[in-house]
Amino acid sequence: MFHSVRTSVYRCSSASMLLRVTVRKAAMRPNVLIGCSRLYSSKQSGASNTTSTKTNQPTIDFSKLSRDEIRKLHELKTAERLKTKNRSIALYFSSIAVVFLGLAYAAVPLYRAICARTGFGGIPITDRRKFTDDKLVPVDIDKRLRVSFTSEVSQILPWKFVPQQREVYVLPGETALAFYKAKNNSDKDIIGMATYSITPGDAAQYFNKIQCFCFEEQKLAAGEEVDMPVFFFIDPEFATDPSMRNIDDIVLHYTFFRAHYGDGSAVSEAASKGEAISPEEQQQMLANATILSPNDLKDE
Amino acid sequence: MSGNPGNSLRALSPTPPERGSFPLDHDNECIIQMQKYLNCMKLVGNENAPNCRLLAKEYLRCRMDHKLMDRDDWNHLGLPRDLEEESISRDKDEHYFGQGK
């Protein structure tokens, strides 16, 4: 009898941890419980105090469990634990996957928004706030700003391109109109494209053009002379920027380059042949035009 | 670069023109207004005086009439409003806010 009590104590203490988990899942494993319940029912009649610690829980008499049954209970418990752990891990990872999938979908408009805001990748910033009506109110400063106009033509472009006025004296916030004149001195229709630069570079951020003739292909017929206006203003914040206080002279410099169509034709050959180009075709050709450099024309 | 340390990229990123490019005046339809404007500027010494700005307004009005420029209000272009527009808007204000104060 002593031996049986000792073994029962041993079995109970070793299996005491199993009690809490397995008892909760007792409903799922009825056969184990049934097998153990007879152990407890027989024990209650005894005077042993080894298993009387947890009397309010459904008690399992571990003393009579065989080693196999204990091992089964242990496996059961670890299986349950692993199952909950696996499930939570699976949920975490699936949620991370869903988040990344959502980010992939949101990336397109986000990228566009970021590029438009910061001008990353050469996308022009069309900041409408620069051109609101309150920006077009002239600021009263002592001395007017002198905006000079200069021009340059690429050496392979047989055009004459000059400004019509040497300079304009403006106030910040005051819109001004300036003219350039371009003449095609050759006997072919030529497409040109103009770019501009502002000197000093710091003042460029305040130089806002409402409308001009730059960065778009301009086609001049042979011998044609045309006037190109620039309508601009200097941002009123120029007057309050401390780094601009020494700047009262701004130079607007236009450079005209030669452009060609996407299919390589340097001139409007269709026009010289006398063919009529449909407007869609013309739009298409102008959209594909690129700027030429003197090296490109060496092959001609 | 500008002296403002938080804004160093601002000078590097140019803004495109608000309305893009002027269509070329191939037929020289507005050349008279342009000549008047340029003569006025020569007289004033390129000062961008108010009377020359009125001639600039005439030039732009010519462009709008000949479909060489999109129509727009003059205050969007920073130019003084027409007298007829002024009286129309004054009548509108009277209508909304009542006569007298």
Image (cartoon, rainbow, N blue to C red):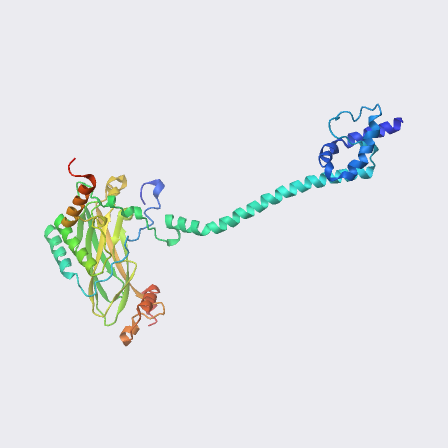
Rendering coords of residue A205 (x, y %): 29, 47
**Residue A163 shows up from this direction:** no
The quadrant holding residue B7 is top left
The x and y percentages for residue A296 are 34, 67
Quadrant (top left/top right/bottom left/bottom right) for the N terminus of chain A: top right
Location of residue A284 in the rendering, given as x and y in whole percent from the top left corner: 34, 66
Residue A5 image-quadrant placement: top right
Task: Please determine whether, in this image, residue B79 is positioned above or below residue A56.
Answer: below
- Quadrant where the C terminus of chain A sits is bottom left
Rendering coords of residue A161 (x, y %):
21, 62
Asked if A217 appears above or below A32 in the picture, the reply is: below
Q: Can you name the residue that lies furthest to the bottom here? A: A273
Asked whether A128 or A186 is in front, the reply is: A128
The residue sitting at the right extreme is A1
Quadrant of residue A29 within the rendered picture = top right
In this picture, residue A276 sits left or right of residue B59: right
Residue B97: tell me if it is visible.
Answer: yes
